[in-house]
Image (cartoon, rainbow, N blue to C red):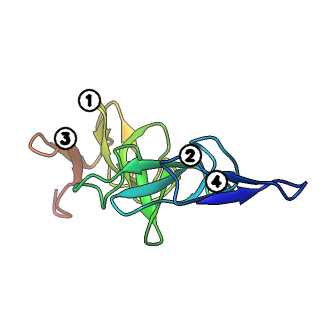
Amino acid sequence: GYYYTESYNCFRCDPKCLFCGGSQDDECLSCPSGSMLYLIDSSETQGSCVTTVPENNGCHYGTYLSGSSTCYACDISCKTCGGPDSTNCLSCFDPSLLIPSGECKSSCPLQTWLDAGTSSCLPCHPMC
C-alpha cells in the first residue's frame, strides 16, 4: 500500500502493512492475510502487524481480539484476557492465580479453592 503526506506526496508503506498512515512498521492501518493489527489501546488508529497465532483468537499472548482483525493490549497483570481491564484476565503469569473476579492475584481469596490444574481460584460450594 501507499500513503499520502500533507503535501500530497505518495510514499510506499512498510512491507508489513497492507494500508498505512506513514512509512514506519508501527503506522499500519490494516494488515495482509496471516497477520493481525496490534494496537496499544482502543484510542489508537495505527499499529503494528503481527503474525497470527492459532491460540488466543489469532492474537499474541498479552493481547485480545476486538472486532475481526485488531488485537489490543491486555492489562499488564494478565497473560490472556477478554478486554483491557485488570478484571478481564482469562489466564495469569506464574505464580499468579486467576480469581473469580477475573483478576490475577498471589493467593486465593476467602470462600475459594485452588484448582492446581488450571491455576485458578474457584468458588467454594455454597454449603461450605
Secondary structure beneath label 4:
loop
Dot 1 surroundings within 10 Å: few (below 14), some, or many (20 or more)? Answer: few
Q: Who is closer to the viewer here, 91 or 126?
A: 91
Picture quarter with the C terminus: bottom left
Q: Nearer the viewer, mark 3 or mark 2?
A: 2
Q: Earlier in the sequence, mark 4 or mark 1?
A: 4
Q: Nearer the viewer, mark 3 or mark 4?
A: 4
Asked if the residue under mark 2 is in contact with the one under mark 4, i.e. CB atoms within 8 Å, the reply is: no
Task: Determine which residue is flagged by label 2.
Answer: 14
Regarding residue 88, the answer to whether it shows in the image is no
Q: Nearer the viewer, mark 1 or mark 3?
A: 1
How far is disc 3 from disc 2 in space, using C-alphas? 41 Å
Q: Amino acid at mark 4?
A: Gln
User: Residue at 26% across / 29% down in the picture?
Assistant: 94
Q: Which mark is residue 50?
A: none
Dot 4 surroundings within 10 Å: few (below 14), some, or many (20 or more)? Answer: many
Name the side, left or right, on which 53 lies relative to 38.
Answer: left
**Quarter of the view holding residue 23:** top right
Q: Who is closer to the viewer here, 100 or 1?
A: 1
